[in-house]
Image (cartoon, rainbow, N blue to C red):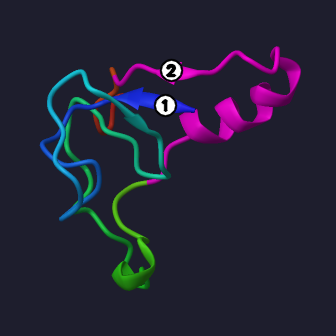
């Protein structure tokens, strides 16, 4: 499961990336609005528990078993906080 990059790093402080690079999808997907710094008070940043968690990756993981083995999913960020 991959996503299109919308920030300058894959994860906060992580490897560099550019707009529209295809990068791995993690729990805090890149979005039109950068929410990687909006952390839950009990988040452990040392464990990568940063940002807001959306539903796109969860849905993609549920769909993956029903897809052909060589197929994948590309998540295209288009959401903005408080839009839904």
One can see residue 15 in this view: yes
* Relative to 82, 26 lies left or right: right
- For residue 74, the mark is 2
27 sits left or right of 68 in the view: left
Tell me the residue at 23%/60% (across/down).
14
State which quadrant residue 21 falls in.
top left
Magenta stretch bounds: 53-77
Taking 17 as reference, is 29 left or right?
A: right
Q: Position of residue 24 (x, y in %)?
A: 45, 40
Packing grade of label 2 (10 A; few <14, some 14-19, many >=20) is: some
Residue at the far front: name it: 70
Queried whether the magenta region covers residue 4, the answer comes back as no
Residue at the (43%, 85%) spot, across then down: 42
How many neighbours does mark 1 have within 10 angstroms: few (below 14), some (14-19), or many (20 or more)? some
Left or right position of 36 against 56: left
> Which of the two labelled residues, at mark 2 and mark 1, occupies the earlier sequence position?
1
Q: Gap in Å between the C-alphas at discs 2 and 1?
A: 5 Å
**Which residue position holds label 1?**
2
Q: Residue furthest right?
A: 66
Residue 23 tag number: none
Q: Above or below — where is 41 with respect to 76?
A: below
Q: Position of residue 43 (x, y in %)?
A: 42, 80
User: Could you tell me if residue 84 is visible in this image?
Assistant: no
At a point 57% along the width and 32% down the height, the residue shown is 1
Q: Is residue 71 located in the magenta-colored stretch of the structure?
A: yes
- Total numbered circles: 2
Badges 2 and 1: C-beta atoms under 8 Å apart? yes
**SS of the residue under disc 2:** strand
SS class, disc 1:
strand
Q: Measuring 43% from the left and 71% from the top, which residue is drawn there? A: 49
């Amino acid at each position: 499961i991959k996503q299109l990059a919308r920030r300058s790093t894959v994860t906060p402080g992580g490897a560099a990336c550019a707009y529209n690079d295809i990068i791995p999808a993690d729990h805090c997907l890149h979005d039109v609005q950068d929410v990687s710094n909006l952390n839950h008070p009990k988040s452990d940043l040392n464990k990568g528990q940063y940002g807001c968690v959306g539903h796109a990756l969860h849905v993609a993981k549920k769909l993956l078993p029903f897809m052909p083995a060589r197929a994948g999913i590309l998540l295209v960020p288009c959401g903005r906080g408080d839009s839904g």
